[in-house]
Each structure stands twice: as C-alpha cells, then as structure tokens.
Image: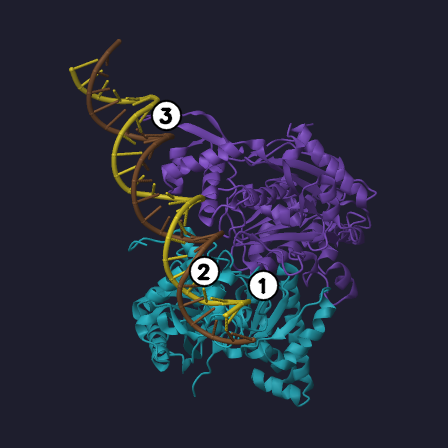
Chain colours: A cyan, B purple, C brown, D yellow
Amino acid sequence: MAVNEAPRISRQFSLCMVMEAIVHCGPISRASIAKQTGLSKQTISEIARQLEEDGWIRETGRTQGHVGRSAVTYEIVPDAACIATVDLGGTKVRAAIADLSCQVLAEVTEPTDARGGVHVISQIARLCREAAAHNDIPYERLRMAVVGVPGVPDQERGRIVMSPNVTGFETLDVRAALAAELGVEIVLENDVNLAAIGEHWIGSVAGVDDLAYIAIGTGIGAGLMVGGDLVRGFGNAAGELGFLPFGTDPFEAESLKVGALERVTGTVGIRRRYRELSGHELDVPGIFDALGAGDVHARQVLDETARYVARAVAAICAITNPGKVVLGGSIGSRRELVERVRDLLPLCFPSPVELDVSELGSRVAIVGGAAVGLTHLHSTLFAGGVPGAEISLPPAKVVKLVEAAQ
Amino acid sequence: MAVNEAPRISRQFSLCMVMEAIVHCGPISRASIAKQTGLSKQTISEIARQLEEDGWIRETGRTQGHVGRSAVTYEIVPDAACIATVDLGGTKVRAAIADLSCQVLAEVTEPTDARGGVHVISQIARLCREAAAHNDIPYERLRMAVVGVPGVPDQERGRIVMSPNVTGFETLDVRAALAAELGVEIVLENDVNLAAIGEHWIGSVAGVDDLAYIAIGTGIGAGLMVGGDLVRGFGNAAGELGFLPFGTDPFEAESLKVGALERVTGTVGIRRRYRELSGHELDVPGIFDALGAGDVHARQVLDETARYVARAVAAICAITNPGKVVLGGSIGSRRELVERVRDLLPLCFPSPVELDVSELGSRVAIVGGAAVGLTHLHSTLFAGGVPGAEISLPPAKVVKLVEAAQ
DNA sequence: TTTTAGTTCGTTCTGTTACCGAACTTATTA
DNA sequence: TAATAAGTTCGGTAACAGAACGAACTAAAA
C-alpha cells in the first residue's frame, strides 16, 4: 500500500472484520480470527502484521493447554487512540475517556460554570484534559469528542437552540469553539438522544433495536431508536414529548409556547398542581416523600402524572412501536412513578408494552457519547468511508465501565 | 469469474455503480460511466461486456453531433427481469409490473373476491399474470412480488393480523400460498407503509427523508420514514394512529378496543357524530357535499375532524419530527379537510409543518410496492448481499408511470 | 474541398493489490 | 511417536488502473 493511498474496498472490509473480531473476542489468535471471518489464514496474518506495525494491536502471549500448536494471541492497544465523551447539564458537567478497546474510563465531574458561554467551553476542554491525565492517557491520543447538550444541536452552525439550562449558547458556534480548545473533531448531540444510544448499547434495552428512552425531570423528552438507528428528524427535534397535544389543551397559547404535556409533567407542572391541591409548596423530591408518608394530595398529583406519562408512552407506541420503553431522569427513574405507569399502560394501550428503568442511571449520556465516539473512531481509522464496512461495538459483558474516582 | 462463484466485494460495488449510472442516466456511454463512477475506462468496458453478455444491458446506438469520437451508448434491457406490485384493498385489488429499467407498467384492477382467503390468493396470482401478459412481458421474467395489505403482516408466519377488510387471512400463511401460486419470492407489506415509500420515491415528498403519510378513510393510519428508511417498529405496528391517546378518553374500554382517535376520525366516527348532531344519516361523501351546500352540522363535524387530524399531525411532529406530512385516503385527500388541517397546525404546534396532499393518489401503494420490489431485485441481481453495495432508484423525471388501460 | 489539429472514445499492455488453495514447517498435547 | 492445530511459503486468479496508442469524430486552416 503506497503512502497516502487508501486501500481498496476489499481491504477496508477485511480490516473492519479483523478489528471487530479482536474488539469483541480479544485476546484472540489469528487462526480463530480466520475461522470467525471466513478469510484465509494467510490474509489474516498479513492484516495482523499491518495492524501491529501501525500500533493498533499487540501480542498478549500464547495459548496453552490444548492439543495442537499453541497460538499467538492479539489484543487491541487501548490507548492507541481514544475519544472524549461529555455530558453537559444545567447543574453538572461530566467528562470521560473511552479507549480503542471500548473501555469507558473513570469520569471527572464539576458543577457547571454558571457564567455560561465561553466559560463553559473552557471548562469542558479542561475536564477532557483532566480525564485523560487522570487515566494516564497521553492527550495526543485523543481523536474526537462527543458532547451531549440539553437542547437541539444545529449541526450546520454549531449552535445549540432550545437550550434553557445553559446560558450563552444560542448564538455561539459551540462546535467551532470546542474544536479550537480541544484541537479535535467535535460532535454535538442532544443528551436524551445519547441516553437512548447508551441504553441501546449496554443498558436496559441492549439488543432491542426499536426503543424509547423517556427522560422526565425539569421537562419531558425522549430519545428514540428505530431499526437500531437514532431518530433525529428533519430539524433534529425528534422526541420533544412536551409538545404532544394532550395533557392540557394544545390550542391554548401557553401550550403553544411551553408544550401541552410539558405544562403538567415537568418539575414546574408537578409542583404547581400539588400547590393548587394542597395549599403547600414542596419540591418534587418532597412530594415523593409526602407520598411515602401517606399524603393524599401527593398521591393524587403523582397518580395524574403517571396517567400523563402512560399516555405519552402510548403515543410513542402508536407511532414508532418500540419493543421496549425505558424511563430515566430525576423524576422518571423514581420507582413510585414507574410502577404506576406500568399498571396504567394496559388500560390505555391494547398491546403489551415492556417498561423498564434506566440501568445506567446518571452515566447514561456518558455511555451514549462513548458509543457515538467509538463508532466514529472505528469508521475513521479502519473503514475509510466505505459504505457497509462497519465495526459493531462489543456487548455489555466485554465492555469495562470504570467507576468514577471519589 | 468461475461459474457459481460470487464475485469479490470490490466487483459487487463496481457492478452496482455501473448499473446505477445506466438506470439513472441511460442511454449512456462507457466513457461517461467511467467519469461518473471514477472507475477506469478499461474496468467499465469489462463490466459492460459482462452485463451485456448476461443480458442485463444492450447497445442503443452511437452519440452524434459533438467534438471527439462518437460513443456507443447502453441502456437497461427492460424485460430482462421484473417484479409484480399488488395493492390489496377491501373493495378492489390492483396489480402492475415494474421492469428492470424502473418503468411501472399499466396496471389491471378488479373488485376483491368477497369470499376472502384462498380465493383472494388465486385472484392476486391471476391478476399478476394478466398484468404481465397485458404488457407483453414473458411470465418467466417475473422474479418476485410485493403485496400491500390492509393490516399488519407477520413476516415470520406469512399471516396478516389486524386486517378487518379482507376475510380469511388471520390464520392463512398468505406468503407461502402466494409463493406457491406465483412461483416467486413474496414480500408482504402494510399498504400505508407502501404509500409512504411511494410518495418518498416519486411523489409529494420525493427527496425528503423524514416524512409521514397519513391515510384517512375507513380508519386513520400512517406510514413513516426516518432517515430515508421505513419505520416498521418492533411488531410491524408503527403508525397505528387510531390508538393515539386523545380524541376520546384512552382509558375507556371502547378506546382500548377500537382506538381513542379511531373512534372519531374514521368513516364510522364521522357518520356517527353527524347523525348525533343533525338527526340525519349521510355517508362521508354526502357529508362533504352537505358542507359545500352550507350545512352547519356538516361544517361542525368536519371542523372537529380537522382538529383531531391536526393533533395527530402534531403528535407525529413531536415524536419523529418529519420534514413533510402528506395526507391521503378517501377522506384524507379531500381538499376541504386538508385546508382546515393546514390552518389549524400553527395553532397547536410551535414549529412550521409542511402539509401536502398525496400526488400519486390511488396509485400510491402500487408505486411503493414497485420501489420495494425494484430495490430488492437490484440487490439480488447485482449486490450479492454485500452491505453498502446499493443501487438507488432513479428520480421522478426518469421514471415512467404508464397509465392504466380502460 | 482537402488536410491538419484537437478532442474524445475505446482497447491493449503491463503492473499492483488483495486474496486463497495447496503444501509444508512448526509447536504443542496425548 | 502420532495427531492436531497454528503459521508460513509458493503460485495462481480476480480486480483494478496508469500509460500508451489506435479509432472516430468535429473544427479550423489551407
């Protein structure tokens, strides 16, 4: 292969097949790779020699304790290249590094800089560097970063629209600013979308290709996947459940502004309804506590909320027919709410709907960002833009999710 | 290439690129194909020789009237292979042939055999043969058939569930029965899904990859596409808009059985509401006529219907964010309804929604079936199962839609 | 009108890349 | 030692393209 010359289509496919076998099953011998991929032993030896020479794989030792010649085994070189994954929220920002062997390393977390705008950009860049240093990864190995944001990323102009939780991003080219600070390619993605991708990879819905992840916290929104692919929509605004036309009258001006369903299912709506019913002011955790203490008003408010959520789930089921629905977010992951919704679903939707709580919890967007970044990294390094040449991410049991340090 | 030996991956890609160039731009010279595909002239000559030898393409003549050597041009041999496309409805069944050059030939139509079951199977088979004969296509050239059905196809067992319009299909392996009668591979697909695919190919939403086709007639349902792919869902039940949780109370038993929205938007619901309001019995065309004659009850019923439809559109927009929505079906294509819905949308959904009427009208499922069948045919003949090797269907201006004979 | 220059199409020759069947060597266990 | 499995070597084919050149046309000049 000449310098600067892309390999032929066939070699891109073969490279991807070999890499996928090592990512999924490493440490693995060349003869095993040949059996798994159907390529000949001599082709595998040549490809492995090239990958080893380029630094992507290395020998781990030899197999032992079986009839026949012992084999040399290979694994991915973890820090040969890596990506950063960032979860930017209104109150916290978290960053982690995912390496070439699909390990998601220990994350670092800070309160979000309340000044917004360029201050948050600097903060993100610093956290990424710290995450790399914290895990002894040379910064130069970083190839790209995926940033989950609480809003709708405008991919063309790098801005974030409809992002009430972080100030200063509506007019700033966030992507260009981050790219300048980090010196790598940046992908912006909605944080709920990343959550859906994370759960699809190694969470509650792993292996289910038609799914919905519903986040209920400040507001209500969903990340949807159909046929294993994320549903973005024409304007990157898929999953905006707050604007479903029920809960309150969708033709009212307030519904048009805030969202008919958003008015009654987010933090503000739940607190308002409890206050109107009881005459008391409580935050949402307080309302859940009052439920546990037998408060009839808390019970009524949360029963109503569950009804609205059940209807939102029914709407998604009527439209995209997911195989599984996962609830997450500070409100959505409360067991009290999930149980109510689960009981109500058979009463308002004719087909069975499998409902679950997010397994990855608060780490779900970090994991989703890792999935997006690793897929992109594999494609860049080994697929050479050839359609159909892909490396699938390994299943949960192969992936290492390193706990955050205290 | 040895007999019975699949070409290598690279040759599958090259074959698809050459075929796509000829399908889109034929008659076309080999030198032009080389320029379009980036492959060398000698490779193109070899591939064209092979395709001509195999009977897929033929010479059409030589170019004239330009500087430089005149070139030999090639086109697809139309009847080298073809597919059948069938639209099975409760009252009518239509069949047409689409050939390798992506012409959709004149269709044949009959009333659906009211006996249902195997009688309809025989009828479909006969109509396909007649469509071939009617267009002078030898039957042996037929490679597969796509059948659009008013229900949810169970792809594993070949049955049709939730199909109230045609009797006898709930327990019959429809696909096996058709395959036995026609002697070719059968694909079953929901007819509204096929409509979405048809409009996406050469209809009102050509070029838009995130779209919704809403059919309103006996009931209400949608075909959805996201990122250019059909949304089927986990149980092939995406787009069942009748079960959206508004219109009537979704927790009522009748809503659970029939669908909360279905109860008020289909033929039965519209007639019932008009009867309750006016004391008169009219069919739906009659109600639209009465609207034109100034009947206040008709106006109220249709205003309400438009409101429900607008909310259904809003629900789809909140969930999948389509770039365009198309209305079809006997009720959905009425101009009076479309105008009302178009005026109501900005009042219940904050982002602009582009709404249109189906351009292909009653032929839309036939066209969608042709798209599915031709894509499958190309893949079978030329892609050899290689992921990423694809031939895109030509745009509307290249496609010929032959009118049905009287 | 004829000749020449320029342009474009299509073929031939030769070489590289990618891959694999067959055969053989090497390195283990039973 | 025999059997088994990993890994290498040899020789061949498929696919592709650079370079070169002949073939076939138009346009301009003589």
In the depicted structure, whether residue D14 falls above or below residue B99: below
Residue bearing the label numbered 1: A209
Local secondary structure at mark 1: loop
* Front one among A389 and B243: A389
Label 1 is placed on what type of residue? Asp
Residue A97 placement: quadrant: bottom left
- Chain holding disc 2: A
Residue bearing the label numbered 3: B70
The residue positioned 54% from the left and 41% from the top of the image is: B3
From mark 2 to mark 1, how far is it between C-alphas?
Answer: 34 Å
- Chain holding disc 1: A
Q: Position of residue A3 (x, y in %)?
A: 28, 55
Q: For mark 2, does the 10 Å Cα neighbourhood hold few (<14), some (14 to 19), or many (20 or more) residues?
A: some
Q: Which mark is residue B361?
A: none
> Residue most toward the bottom?
A293
Residue bearing the label numbered 2: A41
Viewer can see residue B336: yes
The residue positioned 60% from the left and 72% from the top of the image is: A326
The answer to whether tags 3 and 1 share a subunit is no
Using residue B75 as the reference point, say whether residue A84 is left or right of it.
Answer: left
The answer to whether tags 2 and 1 share a subunit is yes
Residue A161 placement: quadrant: bottom left
- The mark closer to the camera, 2 or 1, is 2
Q: Tell me which numbered mark, 2 or 1, is placed earlier along the sequence.
A: 2
Q: Quadrant of the C terminus of chain B?
A: top right
Q: Position of residue B90 (x, y in %)?
A: 76, 44
- Chain holding disc 3: B
Q: Position of residue A402 (x, y in %)?
A: 46, 80
Q: For mark 1, does the 10 Å Cα neighbourhood hold few (<14), some (14 to 19), or many (20 or more) residues?
A: many
